[in-house]
Image: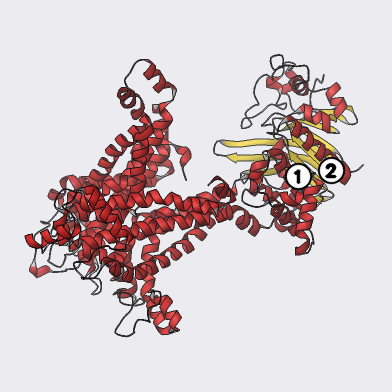
Amino acid sequence: MTDHLTIKDLGLEFRTRHGVVRALEDVSLTVKRGEIVGVVGESGSGKSVMAYSVMGLSDAAAEIKRGSIVLGGMDLLATKGEALRAIRGREMAMIFQSPRTALNPIRKVGRQIEDVLMEHEAIPRRDLRKAAIAALERVRIPDPERRYDAYPFELSGGMCQRVMIAIALACSPSLLIADEPTTGLDVTTQAVIMDLIRDKSRDGRMSTLLITHDLGLAGEYCDRIVVMHAGHVVEVAPTEVLLSRPAHPYTLQLLAATPTPTSTLDTLPSIGGQLPDLRRDLPPCRFSERCARKLPQCDVPPLPWTTLSPDHIVRCRVPL
Amino acid sequence: MSFTTLARNTGHAFGENPLTLVAVVILALLLVCALFGGWIAPYDPLTTDATAKLAPPSLDHWFGTDALGRDILSRVIVATRLDLGMAFSAVALSFGVGLALGSAAGYLGGWTDRIIGRLMDTIMAFPLFVLAMGIVAALGNNVANIIIATMIINLPFYCRFARAEVNVRRDLGYAEAARMGGNRTLTVLVVHIIPNILPPMMVQASLNMGWAILNAAGLSFIGLGVRPPTPEWGIMVSEGASFIVSGEWWAFVFPGAALVLAVFSFNLLGDGLRDLLDPRKRV
Amino acid sequence: MHFIWKRLLATIPSLFGVVILTFLLSHALPGDPAAYFAGPAANADSIAEVRQKLGLDRPLIVQFLHYVGDLARGELGNSLTTGQPVLKDLVDRLPASLELSAFALLFAIGVAIPMGVLAAIRLNGPADHACRAIVTVCAAFPTFFIGLLLVYVFYFLLGMAPEPLGRLNEILYTAPPRVTGAFTVDALIAGDMEVFRASLAQLVLPAISLGLFALAPIARITRAAMLESLSSDFVRTARSSGLPTSKVLFTYAFRNSLLPISSVMGMVFSFLLGSNVLIEQVFGWQGVGAYAVSAVLASDYAAVQGFVLMMAILYILLNLVVDVLATLIDPRVRFEG
């Protein structure tokens, strides 16, 4: 399989009133055709910031300082304006958390799907409605003809997320970014939505980037997992390897903090310390201040990647 | 809000928006005019001069003279007290009455709330300036009734604001604790709740001053309340208006400009105070 | 439809409140209402006659029932100054005021909404600063003063505007045959372009003066509402789907801003109907406002009361229309209603 999405050495800063926040530094990852890659980390680890910079939807205060993002041979950072807009929704699509607010509250959901189709597909006007209903059907929405005329407030959260997925998949993109797609949904609905996303990626040979704070969820649905901490990628490994032999102390803590069927809230350990303030000068390893295994050489740059196996790399001097 | 945050916000509000500082300076100037206008004014505002009718601005008469040869600068200065006085009295009355009615409605709820609410809705069902005209017509055409009319049309804003704030705070911890401590209803309301809602209401009041000035001046512009020859900005604009077609602009421009300046400063001050109290609400 | 009925029913308490308040203003105040209604020139006999005629010697509740009965029959009494039934006076003059207010509203909306939208799109840019400055300045200028300034500049200095003396220069032109009562509309109906242009020219300055004051709240809320929609999740979705900028801005962001904008229209109407009085005074516009001012000054009681009542009813109706329009914009209102 070939790499479809390649992010290389991405560095991104936010200019704020209180100084420059170095939100992403040396972030690299790849997603192959048809692969589901999970990006896992606490909130504030930069995983959503990275996802938004792929879509070209970064905040106005964000500035990409270095690195590259390449999708199917196209340099996304060099693609601007109309050209970028033509790719969004057709080649790459994104779904968000809190699906209720992510849909236009005063537009029929069917029309919202039509908006995307109309923009990217050469469908005659009179066939748009049929195509939108077909898109609703593909995400297994019961009674799609009737749902076409529904407004988001008339639908459940899970139903809204299916509509979001229908919008994202309407033009069969080659890359889907799912940013915490199941947050706020109840457990059964979560499974339904994730199954849907997995099935659609497999069917469409679509590369999928699943952004989540939930390592359990990523473990269940992803082929590979990228762990992020404070704007750094700290470990990349195939899912089974990462879950069974985590090499970065942070991954280990994340794993320990992930609920299992037998754990209770009381026995679940939490991750010690806080994310470092990204406005300060930081040590090469941004985890060192929270790390129980910290050694004096951890503060000496540069921090090398350690390759444990061809597809398992970790950014730690003393991996587990 | 602690004192330090208040101090920091003050610095911030002035630094961020130097216009607030300008507003404060202008208002101080207007206040001086209102208090000591009689002494500052270079001429007697009522003395006519048949030899200097509608004289354009000059070194003798900075703002020119009006149709009866009265010095416009002096009249503008002396009028400050009446204009600001009318607006201030009206706002102070709305503040007091609105606070009382609104607190009662918010604290007691039930029928009190419903009746007061309905009364305020009824006032708001009128275009407010029209209602003010109707009130002045009914009560009688004089300055006191201008103030009462302006007070009534402003009342709903204060009343609703106080009601909402009291309603929220009624069941908060500190009020609950005071009640459990055996305090009487009125004590809880006056000692424990109202002091907390005064600061946001003061902001409302300063934002409201400009509007009250416009209303009172509007009423006198159409000939209600203030009678000639009393100097008052609205009526002076109205008197000066007759000479526009012959090009004597100073007779209406200067009193009008005084009005604009006053309203403008109160609006800016209100905005500044709002930022001071809650920097997040900045629009 | 169901919603509209519900909303219509909800205006009944407002109407009732308005009727009670106008009644109290005229009948239950200290002093002798009969003397008010009889006017300043009345003597003891004529006051007694008025008291008899209006039933002012009877208990308040009986008076109120009579008052409501009279209102139901459209009986607002006779004007002391014109000698005509007040209702007829008002109906004759209302179209002139509505024409003025409508043009002012069109002007205010036409300027404020694009300005607010532009300010929000180019946040902190020159358009935004200009918008903020205009809003601040417009909110500080009394309508009557703006009107006079415009007259001075455009009539006296530049000679561009016609003399500010009413709705049409009746020496040069004859008013079009009355259909709606609005000269511009009637001139168009009559196909008389010359009179149309002349009456429109008379209308420009007063409409702008009146509109400028209404402009501030509309521009302010448009900017705020657009900022809110532009930062909303659904606009982010629209962007991530690659929708064209125009569609993101208008179909998604702007349409969602219309509901907050419609919520300030009540305040705007209140401004317009109130300031109308002042502007009619400045421009010699023969509408209900000018009529009411002379009535107040002449202590023509029935006329003032009729005017206040009519404006309140008009205001309630306008708010009703806005609410109904809001349901067309936002499906949620229909259901929550």
10 Å neighbourhood of mark 1: few (<14), some, or many (≥20)?
many
Q: Is residue A48 above or below residue C173?
A: above
Q: Identify the element where label 2 is drawn.
A: helix
Residue on which disc 1 sits: A165
Chain at numbered mark 1: A
* Relative side of A102 to C144, left or right: right
Q: Which SS class for mark 1?
A: helix
At a point 23% along the width and 47% down the height, the residue shown is B148
**In percent of the image, x 92 and y 42: which residue is there?**
A1
Q: Nearer the viewer, residue A83 or A120?
A: A120
> Is the residue marked by circle 2 packed among few (<14), some (14-19), or many (20+) residues within 10 Å?
many
Mark 1 residue type: Ile
Numbered-mark total: 2
Whether label 1 touches label 2, CB < 8 Å:
yes
Please say whether residue B212 is visible from this viewpoint. Answer: yes
Which residue corresponds to mark 2? A200
Which callout, 1 or 2, points at the residue further toward the start of the chain?
1
Question: Residue A90: horizontal and vertical position, in percent?
Answer: 78, 53
